[in-house]
Amino acid sequence: MIDVQNLTKRFSGRTAVNGISFQVQPGEIVGFLGPNGAGKSTTMRMLTGYLPPTSGSAAINGHDVFNDSLKARREIGYMPENVPLYEDMRVAEYLSFRAALKGVKIREVRSSVDRAVEYCGLGEVKKKMIGTLSKGFRQRVGLADALVHRPRLLILDEPTNGLDPNQIRAVRGLITQLAGEHTILLSTHILSEVQLNCRRVIIINKGEIRADNTPDALAGSLQSSGTVTVELDAVPVQVEEKLQALAHVRRLSFSEVGGGWHRYEMRVEPGEEVRLAISELAKAQNWPLRELTQHTATLEDVFVELTQRD
Amino acid sequence: MRTFFILLVKELRAFFLSPVAWVVLALFMVITGQSFSLSIGLLREKPSDFSIVRWTFFPQWFWYYYFFLFPLITMRLFAEEQRQGTLESLLTAPVRTWQVLLAKYGSAVIFYCVLWLPALLYFGLLHWVMRGDVEIPLGALGGSYLILFATGLFHLALGCLASALTRNQIIAAILGYALILLHFLAGTFLMYLSQDNPDRLRPLLDQAVTMRHMDYFTLGLIDTRPLAYYFSGAVLILLITHQVLEYRRWKA
């Protein structure tokens, strides 16, 4: 569906996107993740034909976005960042205009608009001026605009940006509903969104792809997936050496948490189980134990790790 | 073609649904109506070299308001799209940049033409009231409309260019006004120069001096050279505007 090869974009000396390549298969929902200024929007603007690439190429369904731009654009429903809309148009009027513009037959415009309105829950504001709508509704109008012509590919640039938690949940629900019919590429810096919606995550930082995998695999592959915390009522002098001596334990740090209790954190080799050994050790040494946890990394850990490394 | 018409209809709606357009239209009718009424009074007082058409369309104060018209019509066209960011959603739809440009320009031209239509009614009304006793020279009327149309095309194109250059409507208006006035003053300057050296500058004068064109055409003298000048000028400016809009495509 999307085929990106060595895509590069330079703005007067600054490289916004640096030779990225990836593919998206039909039906996939891909989350495009990265801090602000990482090159997400620039990449999306190149995919939608708004900005030309400096070098490299991108194709939508086999149509090059630069040389065969019109055909490529017909396949796409694009929701730009901050959802630009005509303030002085009514919702239904705007959607009709957009549907016709994107090639929906005049006879079918009305039904397409009705479908998009229903899908995005815009029924109550259908006749309102866009300028008077709340942020949440504007966002939904943008989404309705993106899908009004039933494109095969939806490109959504930060669809939940600036919404309150309820609205985020509503938009997220919408996206999940859309998943069946469309291939979706969505960008965000809200991690929970990706974790809930996407089966694949591409993490981008400083214009380069840092990771491209399923959310779970990404979390699993991370070093910090093997962090074990244990709280013992024992002083470090006794404990430190013995814990360090256990198999698979790498780095140990501790802190006092009061009342004689100490909290020990250790990095263990990924995929290894050391909790049993620790509990047995504590029993053998008669150390009172009140907590023993193994942390699985969240996408947030992956994100921080990958985007702050340098 | 279909895309162009969808865009054109949208632009026309934007014109006629905005209060600014109606205010401009009303003001303009007041001005032309006043000119018309004054010209009748003038011709009743004493005979004149010029016809009623000439006095209605080009009274002395014509140049004071004529150039304000264009920035008012065109300032919104692209500047507003750029300010709202809607240019991005517009140009990522399957449309070509020239379709967007021509639709916006076309809607401005249509609105401009509509501004001049009520004046026809004045003449018709006069003819009807006076039962044909007043001579309304049709040649002069046709010539006036033709030159107003031609200069309008050129000036509206300049206004479009100004609007494409900025995201601020006020700047677009001032810039457009400056460009239009510059073109007019350059012509007036030529006319001034020609007072000392009429023969050498004469060919140039006939080409590029708006004031002179107006004089000829309102007499009913239709000269194709100024028409070619304005039409090709408008095409050139529109091509430049197109390049400005496509600038983001080739800036690296």
Image (spheres, helix red, strand yellow):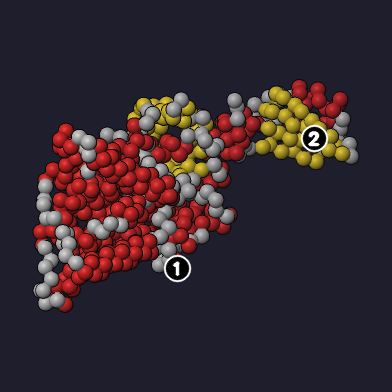
Which residue is at the front of the view, B52 or A80?
Answer: B52
Which residue lies at the image location 43% right of the left edge and 50% below the top edge?
B170
- Where residue A73 appears, as percent x and y from the top left, is 31, 43
- The residue identified by callout 2 is A263
- Residue A163 appears left or right of B166: right
Q: Residues within 10 Å of mark 1 (few under 14, many from 20)?
A: few
- Where residue B133 appears, as percent x and y from the top left, is 11, 74
Residue type of the residue flagged with mark 1: Glu
Residue type of the residue flagged with mark 2: Arg
Give the SS element for disc 1: helix
Which residue lies at the image location 75% right of the left edge and 26% below the top edge?
A252
The tag earlier along the polypeptide, 2 or 1, is: 1
- The residue identified by callout 1 is A124
Q: Chain of mark 1?
A: A
The image quadrant where one finds the C terminus of chain B is top left
- Where residue B152 appears, as percent x and y from the top left, is 24, 51
Q: Chain of mark 2?
A: A
Which residue is at the front of the view, B134 or A290?
Answer: B134
- Where residue B174 appears, as percent x and y from the top left, is 40, 47
